Amino acid sequence: MHYPKVFQSLIAHFSGLPSVGPKMAERIVLYLFKQDEEKLQSFAESLEALHHLKSCTRCFHIAEGELCFICADTKRIQNTLCLVEEPLDVIAIERTGAYQGLYHVLGGLLESGKSDNSQNLRINELLNRVENDGIQEVILATNPTTEGDLTALYLKKKLEPYKIKVTRIGRGMATGGDIEYADELTLVSSLTNRKELV
Ligand SMILES: [Zn+2]
């Protein structure tokens, strides 16, 4: 490679990002090289600030302090939880503006056919919230994939003793689809058409 070391290092960093190949990484680094110092400084500061972010202690969404901005908002409907796999799903649903309740980020899905990984998911934390926070409905909004469905059924069973309403997002979303990439209309209709799991 004919680039200075700094370039090589940056290209290596960028080409390790999702959907960025080596050619694209090269282009990004050359683009950044042409930016003025102030812009680069601000970019570097934002990167630096990333590791100060935490997980919300209540719902495990990304948070700047103890609680994320959703949990900190007392105007949200406090007795409804939307259960999702990861923070990007929260962002996708928030973008629709159609949901006013709270969330619970599970941190993954049950893996079908593999060893039991339920200990790595925030299931006990979910049950604690249902038990102590006056939750009346949990919307299971895992992706409509094999693992998403498996996780939803597992959680439905776990939630049974609490005698609350447990719903699953509607089939507006194509089977195998991904909440993170679903368009807003589809997401809104799958939330609106959620069905009680019995
Ligand atoms: Zn939160």
Image (spheres, rainbow, N blue to C red):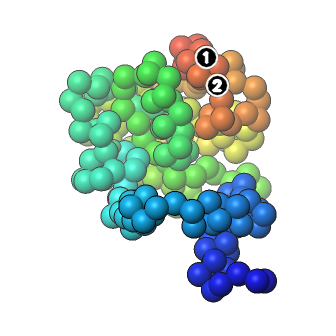
Q: Quadrant of residue 171?
A: top right
- What is the quadrant of the N terminus in the image? bottom right
Note whether 142 is above or below 120 in the view shown: above
Note whether 112 is above or below 97 in the view shown: below
Q: Residue furthest bottom?
A: 5
Does the image show residue 184? yes
Which three-letter amino acid code belongs to the residue tagged 1? Leu
Q: CA–CA distance between discs 1 and 2?
A: 6 Å
SS at circle 1: helix
Residue 181 image position (x, y, % from top left): 66, 35
Give whichever of 117, 86 is nearer the camera.
86
Circles 1 and 2: CB distance less than 8 Å?
A: yes
Give whichever of 132, 188 is nearer the camera.
188
Q: Which mark is residue 183?
A: 2
Residue 22 image position (x, y, % from top left): 76, 67
- What is the quadrant of the C terminus in the image? top right
